[in-house]
Amino acid sequence: MCVTHPDAPSCHFQDFESHGYAHVLPLAKDEETCRKIATHVPEVGCAHSVLSLGISSDVASAAGQSAAKLDLFHTKWRTAARAVRAGFNVLLLDTDVLQVGNKTALR
């Protein structure tokens, strides 16, 4: 699972596949961003959520974030938790992470 950023709409899916990860699920802030991802990597699905936690801009700015970014953060962890509850192993990465090797080989 990777979380998209409007300025970087796709993750490095081929890198994940080359390391044996079977499923990659990008999470986006909206349907438009999912469409951008589909133009780059049509074989990968995308998920977005219209859920809003109703966080006020004052509370969000006190946390140094926007309310939309906090909503996406919550969606990311909620989605990961559902996958774990369903029995899947989950590796959760953001777009500012570059995987340079097979981390499953570490002991």
Image: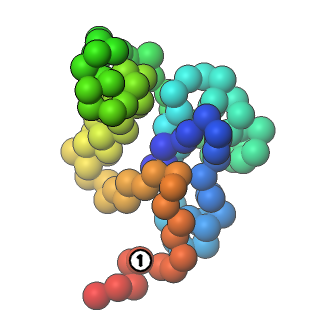
From the top left corner, tell me how far across and down residue 6 is, in percent: 61, 35
Instruction: Examine the rendering and report whether any part of residue 75 can be seen.
Output: no
Identify whether 84 is placed above or below 67.
Answer: below
Closer to the camera, 59 or 82? 59
Residue density around tag 1, few if under 14, some if 14–19, many if 20 or more, within 10 Å: few
Q: Residue furthest left?
A: 85
From the top left corner, tell me how far across and down residue 23 is, in percent: 50, 54
Q: Residue furthest bottom?
A: 107
From the top left corner, tell me how far across and down residue 3 is, in percent: 48, 43
Q: In which quarter of the image is the C terminus?
A: bottom left
Callout 1, which amino acid? Answer: Lys
Q: Residue at x 51, y 80 (%)?
A: 101
Colour style of the rendered protein structure: rainbow
From the top left corner, tell me how far across and down residue 99 is, in percent: 52, 70
Q: Residue at x 56, y 39 (%)?
A: 5
Instruction: Examine the rendering and report whether any part of residue 51 can be seen.
Output: yes
Report the residue marked by disc 1. 103
